[in-house]
Image (cartoon, rainbow, N blue to C red):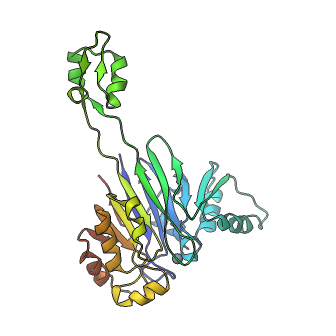
Amino acid sequence: MIFEVTILGSSSATPTAFRHPTSQVLNINEKLFMIDCGEGTQIQLIRYKIKYQRINHIFISHMHGDHYFGLVGFLSTMHLQGRNTPLNIYGPPELEQILQLQLNNNGNHLNYQIIFHALEQTESKVIFEDKELQIETIVLSHRIPCTGFLFREKERPRKLIRDKVIEYDLPISAFHDLKDGKDYIDENGKVYKNEDFTTPSRAPRSYAYCSDTIYNEAILPQINNVDLLYHESTFMNDSILRAQETFHTTSLQAGIIAAKAKAQKLIIGHFSARYRDLQPVLLEARSQFENTSLAIEGEKFRIE
Ligand SMILES: [Zn+2]
C-alpha cells in the first residue's frame, strides 16, 4: 500500500538551470494526485516516467504563476495523448476563467471533461473523500489567498485473528462488530472481547503540503502529528525581513513549525534562485528539526 510523494519542482518565482517551479505528485495506493503545476511540469512528468494520464485530481494552491503556469500545457498534452476520462481541478475561483480563456480560443475542445472545484480560501474544508482517503484544505497566509492541502488516510478496520475466530466458531455476523472495534455478544449474552479476536490495523498515514506562507502558527493544530510535512522555505533566516515582506518562510522557521507540529519528517522547498548550494539551507532547518530533507527534483519520499 504505497504512500509516496515525488518532487517535480522546488524553485520559487523563477526557474533556474537546476530547479523547476513547484509541482509534486502524490501516489496513494496507485491513485495519483498532482499538487501545483509550475511551468514545464509536464516535462518533469515525462522525465520521471510518471503515468500522468492516471492523474485524476490536480490541486492548485494559489494564483502566483510559479504554481500554475504549467497547467494549460499539461491539459493540452493529455488531450493530444487521447485522454477521455474526466479531470478534477481544485483551485482559486479565478483559475477557472483563466483556463477557459486559454483553452477555448484555439477552436479545439478537449476530449475530456474538466470538473472545476473552486476553493473556499478563508476556512478549511474537506474537498475530497473516498473510502480510503480524505483531503482537506489548510488556510495559509500569503500575499494573496493561498491554500495548503492535508491528505489523510481514513482509519482502517481492525484485523480479525483468524485462528481465534475459527477456534471459537464465531458466525460471520460477528465479524462486522469486531472489525468496527466492538465486542461481539452472542444470543446467549456471552461477550467476546474485541481485543481477544482482533489486532489494530496500521495507523493511517498523512501528508501536509504547505506552500507559500509567512511563518504562521495558526496551522499547527491542523497539522499536528502529521507523518510527512512539506513546508516552503524560500529564504534563509538572514533574509527574514525579505521573507516577511514577501509573505514567505525561512528555513529556520520551517524547522520550528515541523518541531512544534511534532511531524515525523519535514521536506523543505520553494527555494529562492539566490541559493545555488542548498546545504546551508538544509542545515539551518535541521538546527530546529533533525529529520529534514530538501525537495530535490526526482526525489521520492515514502511513508511506510
Ligand atoms: Zn506565491
Q: Tell which residue pokes out farthest to the top in this image.
A: 188
Residue drawn at x 30%, y 18% as measured from the top left: 185
Where, by quadrant of the figure, is residue 269 drawn? Answer: bottom left
Q: Nearer the viewer, residue 37 or 174?
A: 174
> In the visual, does 38 lie left or right of 163?
right
Q: Tell which residue pokes out farthest to the right in this image.
A: 107
Q: Give the image location of residue 231, x and y in percent.
A: 39, 70
Residue drawn at x 41%, y 59% as measured from the top left: 222
Q: How many marks?
A: 0
Q: Give the image location of residue 255, x and y in percent.
A: 31, 73
Q: Establish if 193 lies above or below 240.
A: above
Residue drawn at x 28%, y 16% as measured from the top left: 170
Q: Is residue 1 visible?
A: yes
Q: Give the image location of residue 16, x and y in percent.
A: 46, 83
Where, by quadrant of the figure, is residue 1 drawn? Answer: top left
Q: Give the image location of residue 294, x and y in percent.
A: 33, 73
Q: Nearer the viewer, residue 285 or 139?
A: 139
Q: Is residue 273 visible?
A: no
> In the visual, does 284 lie left or right of 120?
left
> In the visual, does 65 lie left or right of 261?
right
